[in-house]
Image (cartoon, rainbow, N blue to C red):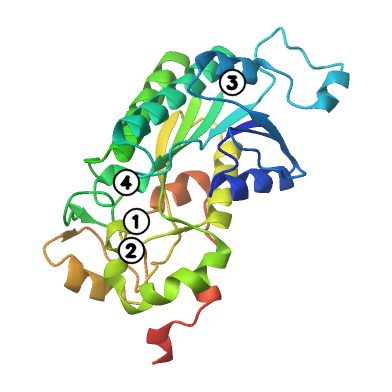
Amino acid sequence: MRIFFTGGSGKAGHHVAPSLAAAGHQVTNADLTPLGHPDVTDLRVDLTDAGETYSALAGVPTMDDFDDPDLDLTRGSVYDAVVHFAAVPRVLLAPDSATYATNVLAHYNVLEAATRLGIRKIVFASSETTYGVCFGQGERKPLYVPVDEEHPVVPEDSYAMSKVAGEVTAASFHARTGADIYGLRINNVIEPEEYAELFPPFLQDPSLRRRNLFAYIDTRDLAQLTLRCLETDGLGFEIFNVANADMSVAATTEEIIERFYPDVEVRREMGRDETFYCIDKARDLLGYRPQHSWRDVLPDPRREA
């Protein structure tokens, strides 16, 4: 595929975009900052500008494409898919109004340009924050566990609000065009080298992970899920939770429930270390099978004891 990838220079994108290229796809990174990866083409685009966004998606992807006799720029975009990860990635990086406005406008521009140019597959980054726990004022608990995609989205912060708005916008563009548009409610993104630095405190004090529902997503498994979205057609509009299969703490699920969720409904039996951020839907519809864990790098203090 020719993939128009927005935000490929960000924390998640700079892992996922090269992974898609390694899988054999041609990837163009649309970002304000270049990625500088030899297998990914960089294109500077301000996605809050509708004209720039449309022009970028309507353009020639690479220098080699000028010599492609089969390339026809008169029949819409030559890109086969869009992966839209670009955003102000959380609160407290910009004023709340700027975070919301930037994310909502860029998201709309990308979806409008892509669908008007005939692209039939769009994968976009939503967020765990939509459930209202991560950046809620004070302590917020889910209504039930494990938290699946049917759980109400009740955000209080500008970032999560922008992501909920993005999901509604995506559903509307699907209704208008029939394109496959898949949203990924991505949990806390962890790079492989961060395990040794970040996780030892989490293993000792699970309260540090309360706002993330004790979950995480390894960038390599995020890349796998993104690829599975690109390879899976015909689902229409769907939202998927994205996390690893286990928790980011050493405490067991039973211990987490007793300490943090004693009054929260437990809807089904859970495994000893199973994530509270339910990924059953991605497993069933996309064939997602997370491969990585902090346990591959660090000893589990509970099991050693």
Element class at badge 3: loop
Position of residue 64 measured from the top left corner of the image (x, y, whole percent): 85, 27
Question: Where's residue 43, x and y in %?
Answer: 67, 29
> Is residue 171 positioned above or below 244 on the image?
above
Q: Residue at x 52, y 25 (%)?
A: 47
Q: Quadrant of residue 70?
A: top right
The mark that comes first in sequence, 3 or 2, is 3
- Residue carrying label 3: 119
Against 233, is 255 above or below?
below
Residue 182, how many percent across, how many down? 46, 34
CB contact under 8 Å: marks 1 and 4: no
Check disc 2 and report the residue beneath it: 214
- Mark nearer the viewer, 3 or 4: 4
Point out the tag, 4 or 2, that comes first from the N-terminus: 4
Q: Quadrant of residue 89?
A: top left
Q: List the residue tagged with mark 4.
A: 129
Which of the two marks, 1 or 4, is nearer to us in this view? 4
**Mark 1 touches mark 2? (CB < 8 Å):** yes
- The disc at residue 277 is 1
- Amino acid beneath label 3: Ile
Single out the residue that lies furthest toward the bottom: 305
- Establish if 272 lies above or below 39: below
